[in-house]
Image: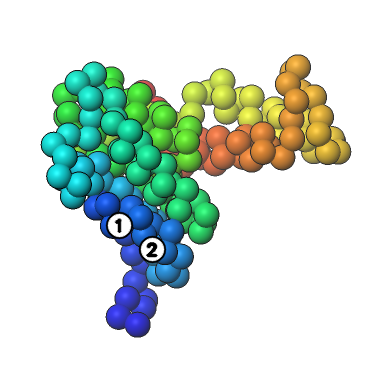
Amino acid sequence: APLEGYDVIALCETARGVLFAPRIAALPQVVALMWGAEDLVASLGGTSSRHDDGSYRDIARASRARVLLAAGAFGKSAIDAVHVDIADLDGLSNEARDAVASGFTATACIHPGQVATIRGAYAPPPEQVAWARGVLAAAEGARGVFRHEGRMIDEPILRHARSLVARAREVPRGAEG
């Protein structure tokens, strides 16, 4: 196999790439999938992945979801597309916060000026980390589904909490703000 010994981040940037995302994610040397909005739309003959208000068109949202699902189905990382409007840090922040909440493990950037915004979006707020640590501590003495601070807690919620605690450990210094 020509790729043996290499870790591959596969870019799903065309209609064909997005449609084959599950087959690509199944390859053992693939460690992550990334999608590309503008290349995707260009492969379809379109002119823009976004509406005038900056939101993604349906085809881009569907492709983003398909790549994320394919990566998740095979235990691979998913990398969200770049935000091409370099000056739109608010839009980038909103998009990156949505990406991490949806399950992306990273967001690619196109300009160094975007790095701090992306890191900040992936850094969980201290109050969320405190809640996660509290619910994980409460789970140590609980069996099955239980109640914590008025909220039902089950295994998916505990997985969310573990993810928050893990992200809090991974954020580089200086990226919190």
Q: Residue 138 vs residue 4: left or right?
A: right
Counting every numbered tag in the picture gives: 2
- Residue shown at 45% from the left, 53% from the top: 71
Which amino acid, mark 2?
Answer: Ile
Badge 1 density bin: few <14, some 14–19, many ≥20, Cα 10 Å: some
Give the number of the disc on residue 71: none
Give the number of the disc on residue 24: 2
Front residue of 33/47: it is: 47
State the image coordinates of residue 134 (x, y, percent, origin top left).
Answer: 70, 27
Question: Residue 73, relative to residue 26: is it above or below?
Answer: above
Q: Disc 2 on helix, strand or loop?
A: helix
The C terminus appears in which quarter of the rendering? top left
Q: Disc 1 on helix, strand or loop?
A: helix
Question: Residue 10, relative to residue 129: is it above or below?
Answer: below
> Does residue 174 appear anywhere in the picture?
no
> Does residue 159 appear anywhere in the picture?
yes
- Residue shown at 77% from the left, 35% from the top: 139
Badge 2 density bin: few <14, some 14–19, many ≥20, Cα 10 Å: many
Disc 2 or 1, which lies upstream in sequence? Answer: 1
Front residue of 177/102: it is: 102
The N terminus appears in which quarter of the rendering? bottom left
- Residue shown at 81% from the left, 29% from the top: 146
Tell me whether circle 2 and circle 1 mark residues in contact (CB < 8 Å).
yes
Which amino acid, mark 1?
Answer: Gly
Q: CA distance from mark 2 to mark 1?
A: 8 Å
State the image coordinates of residue 57 (x, y, percent, origin top left).
Answer: 28, 31
- Residue shown at 33% from the left, 33% from the top: 58
Give the number of the disc on residue 17: 1
